[in-house]
Amino acid sequence: MRSSRYNFREAETRWQKIWDEGKVFETKTDDPRPKYYVLEMFPYPSGRIHIGHVRNYAMGDVIARYRRAKGHAVLHPMGWDAFGMPAENAAMEKKSHPATWTYANIATMKAQLKSMGLSLDWSREIATCDPDYYKHQQRMFLDFLKAGLVTRKTSKVNWDPVDHTVLANEQVIDGRGWRSGALVQQRELTQWFLKISDYSEELLAALDDLPRWPEKVRLMQANWIGRSEGLMLRWALVENTAPAGFSELEIYTTRPDTLYGASFMAVAADHPLAKAAGEKDPKLAAFLEECRRMGTSQATLETAEKKGYDTGIRARHPLDPSWELPVYVANFILMEYGTGAIFGCPAHDQRDIDFARACNLPIKPVVRPASQSDAEANAAFSPDTPPFLDDGILFNSGFMNGMDVDAAKEAAIKRFEGESLGGRPTGQRKVNFRLRDWGISRQRYWGCPIPIIHCDDCGIVPVPNQDLPVKLPEDVTFDVPGNPLDRHPTWKHVACPCCGKPARRETDTMDTFVDSSWYFARFTDPSNSQAPTTLSAVNKWLPVDQYIGGIEHAILHLLYSRFFTRAMTMTGHADIKEPFAGLFTQGMVVHETYKNVDGQWVAPAEIRIESSGDARKAFEIASGRPVTIGSIEKMSKSKKNVVDPDDIIESYGADTARWFVLSDSPPERDVIWSEEGVQGAARFVQKVWRIIGEASALPAAGSTAGDVHPVTKAAHRAILGVGEDIERIRFNRCIAHIHELANEISTALASPDKAAHAGVIREACRIMVLLFAPMMPHLAEECWRDLGGEGLVANTDWPEADAALVAESELVLPVQINGKKRGEISVPADADAAATEALVRVNPMIEALLEGRAIRKVIVVPGRIVNIVV
RNA sequence: GCGGCUGUGGCGGAACUGGUAGACGCGCUCGGCUCAAAACCGAGUUCUUUCAACAGAGUGUGGGUUCGAUUCCCUCCAGCCGCACCA
């Protein structure tokens, strides 16, 4: 009745059906047990799942199943990040509708995920392209607008003149649109922004409250937010040198201590002062144009040499009115940061010294190392000296002489805050951030419409609540470039909700990162048709206890979601700060690459590998020709080094695939997909099957008296080890513990007196099944049934470890002499340092090792080691 | 350029807050079973000393702290990642 080989095909579908029909993984929103929310980043429905998804979702599933067994009410939902450009591109190529393509992909991928046996609550499934989802997003957009969190302003964007759309920075490759290949232009467009920069300080400070986030991600976010402390300082312009209406120039600096080393001022090409000066100076106007053009290509921007143009305008040094400095337009100054104007101190800034050398400007040192005297520093200085950027002592600097950098900064700020220019303080302490507001306008069809109506008389009018959602029209075509919403014959024409006159809908849609900024909140009650969230549910279930996804979202998605959560709290849609209490960033699945003699990439399925000794050789199956084995790389279609999850699950089963992607490499690192590795996992599945079969077949026996059987010790050690390692997300170690237990059980089954120990062996098997169930859930149910277990493993509690069973009565301690291991000694497990030392001193074996040398000192770490110093 | 991470057998990796380096898996070698193969079972597998050792060396390099360092500190080397004129 029980076959000698485990038939995963039959068993996996059977158990999946049983879980499904029993609604085993559906979560009751009001479940009274302690909650645990596990979430993996939801996928974009691109067509088929890839092996990276298998790893990501296998990890989340281990945690979800473990927490359920530990008595938590677990929320483990799944959905689709379903808006985005690929659907439009597919529509263009295949002449179909983005929705058709998207929903077909969702159906395919859902079936694939189901075949993995994930413990997901599919009753909560959401797709962001569903009007029942995005209508709430539109409502929140309007609430944010009311709360002052939305703004409309003109900004520079990457414009693709062929596709007629804005491109994100990462979609511009070497200055060209990734799809059209057209040279991207910088355009000024009026766009909608979410005011994430209002939360710069808060988003930065709260990173400290996220101890369960990887240090690396927190650091990346901190750098991205880019806080700096400095001074806003207003400089008087010399009369008659400045264009009419300009009497001062305000700059931002983090180095007010180096003011005495100033040698020039510089403004961005887009600075109002530059524009005004350019009106009278054709050469300057040409230079400004050149700077703007340069900005179109990131590649040239990165390698561009510093260039400047002397406007002829002069500024008075705020510490010495008789000192006049030239005002340049410089190509490296950004209008978007600070005030778009700086003062340059070449001796203490790399960019400034590059610029000063290019434009032949003076270089004067004002900070020296503490080890030098002023005279030595002056003598050592030459214009070729690299800029001194470290902390040091001020010199050549009037009232700041002798101070260190921090003290001098303070002194300068205090001084300018006390002085005034034109009736206002000359300077003001100022904290600046690199983080900009989040531009969410996209000139695209397949996204959430921005619910705004433009009226010539009333201006910008929100779509009234009862008119939501603003749905996408379905009769659209993609045969010409540009935004189908904009050229739709009727969709954008609408009466103004205020005055009733003809008005126009906003035709931009939202960045898809908006969709993913709150889906985790929607999962807590996805059936609420009246509001985005149900407060009691969202506040109960959030934050997500464990969020799992790729490191590529370290900044964008994770920062947007942190902001969005705060914005939802501000507008009454939640009452929490941080969306994700625990974050784990998993590594990729990588694979060897293969090339044939023609230099073409060859897929793993098309080759066979022969190995002799340590050497491996590969051949094309079809032709028998040799294949070069190349480097291990991220799976990509172009290099053909992909494996398809469907193929793997078909030939090995979901449990084997899950077991393999969790084994070997630590979860945060890349795992190398290899045929040998998968076969190893498959062998283990069959080994477990045989072990359980043998153990179940042993004649029933009572409990065994006497010493604790080694298999029992191993089982209880494994309970402790596996539990701890799941909690610390070290699945590779969990798998090692389970291997050890399986080996111990095999040994017990090979022993001639196995029948006498049938009870303890079966108990160890029962424990092993519960321990590997989070990783191989189908095999676990099958084995559980064979062992006579009650109900489903999926509903069974995690086993309790008995510390007394793990304890050993005797310990073997290594004995070192002068730090080198020379022997071993057996001591009672409870021997303290003194008792152990006494045993060591009388041990004849150790006496022999000492060869008559006198003991100077004995170091005992109880339970660990003995070291004898001679 | 700035910031960060990583470096351990043939390979992936393990080693808790400094305490027996190489758990566990893959691969490989030998043996068993078999007419044979696969599967399975058993033994071995860091390097060196022609065998072996209770021999020596050994966690990228060189130094330091310590009774004791893969672990802590400093130097250098290599690889990977993030940011990139942010004043």
Image: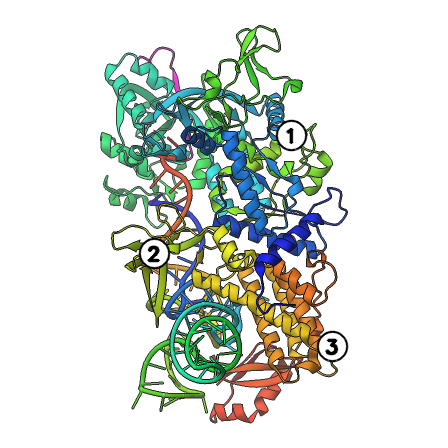
**Residue A675 higher or lower than A312, as above or below:** below
Kindly indicate whether the residues beneath marks 2 and 3 are on one polypeptide chain.
yes
- The residue lying at 59 percent from left, 92 percent from top is A842
Q: Secondary structure at mark 3?
A: loop
Identify residue type, mark 2: Ser
Q: Nearer the viewer, residue A753 or A358?
A: A753
Q: Main secondary structure of the magenta part?
A: loop
Identify residue type, mark 1: Met
Kindly indicate whether the residues beneath marks 1 and 3 are on one polypeptide chain.
yes
What's the mark number on residue A68?
none
Between the residue at mark 2 and the residue at mark 1, the CA separation in whole angstroms equals 51 Å
* Residue wearing tag 3: A700
- The residue lying at 60 percent from left, 17 percent from top is A462
Q: Secondary structure at mark 1?
A: helix
- The answer to whether any part of residue A41 appears in the image is no
- The residue lying at 69 percent from left, 46 percent from top is A26
Task: Mark 2 vs mark 1: give the one in front.
Answer: 2
Q: Which residues are magenta?
A: A239-255
Task: Mark 1 vs mark 3: give the one in front.
Answer: 3
Task: Mark 2 vs mark 3: give the one in front.
Answer: 3
Q: Earlier in the sequence, mark 1 or mark 3?
A: 1
* Residue wearing tag 2: A631
Say few, some or many: other residues with alpha carbon within 10 Å of mark 1 (under 14 / 14 to 19 / 20 or more): some
Chain ID at mark 2? A
* Residue wearing tag 1: A570
Q: Earlier in the sequence, mark 2 or mark 3?
A: 2
